[in-house]
Amino acid sequence: MFWNLRFNPMIYLRSLSFYIVYVVSGLLVGIAGCLIGPFLNIGNRIKFLSSWPKFANWVLYKSCKIEVVVEGSENIPDAPFVIASNHQGQWETFFYQYFFFPMTTLLKRELLFIPVWGWALALLKPIAINRGNPAVALKTALREGEERIKKGFSVLNFPEGTRKNPREVGRYARSGFELAKKTQVPILPIVHNSGDCWPAHRFLKFPGKINLTIGAPLENIESSAEAALEIERWARKKLESTKPLNG
């Protein structure tokens, strides 16, 4: 991977410039969202706050030379549906926010406690769960997920539960698949290599392409366990066939 290579001053400067704009703009939009968000309906609130992740992705492209290539857009069904995506870093959390609209996210509740950004995130009505109590978390995900789907929202789920290294796929949990089964909506499988360009918990951003593949939706789910295993295998196969950047 790039982070094993000799230090490159230009990559550092590009990453620094990205973070300056990223943090400052995020704070400004977060403050604005906290001030005017409560006075907007949920649809307009999401549109307003989703403008920042779209802007951030543009800044990422301009400053760090990271291009996004999407394959399989024709597979996206009419909303609502449940998104089952692998998780490698922060990039996908904000890209999906504006790429799939309207959408709500299944996430750990601790994120809502982050000053300004977390408060603005709470205005998007995510499904916040306590991962320390899996039984309660599953009940919350099913109850609130069903409410959002009935209102026409798709639900973003990272079934691995935590970020993985590039070309690694963790075991897929059943909660999102159980929600799709209960509400009789499709599961939309997605896999990407964002960790090649934006490694989790690292400052440097590396130029290249983030390839995001959208698979055919899985419908009429009878077994959440079998559906989770099928899409996990699909994701692993797709990533194994992806050539590592600079590899």
Image: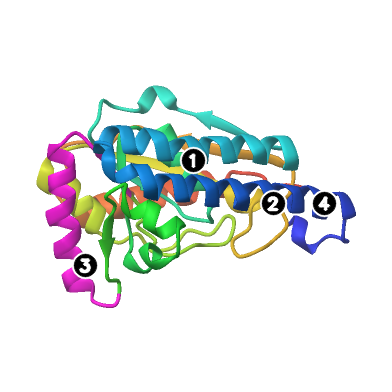
Horizontal side of 18 relative to 140 (left or right) equals: right
Check disc 2 and give the amino acid type: Ile
Q: CA distance from mark 1 to mark 2?
A: 19 Å
Between label 3 and label 2, give the one nearer the viewer: 2
Q: CA distance from mark 3 to mark 2?
A: 36 Å
**Residue 137 in view, yes or no:** yes
Residue at label 2? Answer: 20
Horizontal side of 130 relative to 11 (left or right) equals: left
Q: Residue at x 54, y 52 (%)?
A: 27
Question: Residue 170 location in percent, x, y?
Answer: 44, 63
Question: Residue 135 location in percent, x, y?
Answer: 17, 72
Between label 3 and label 4, give the one nearer the viewer: 4
Question: Residue 197 location in percent, x, y?
Answer: 67, 49
> Label 2 neighbourhood size at 10 Å, few (<14), some (14-19), many (20+)?
few
Check disc 3 and give the amino acid type: Ala
Horizontal side of 85 relative to 128 (left or right) equals: right
Question: Residue 160 location in percent, x, y?
Answer: 39, 61
Q: Residue at x 74, y 51 (%)?
A: 15
Check disc 4 and give the amino acid type: Leu
Check disc 1 and give the amino acid type: Phe
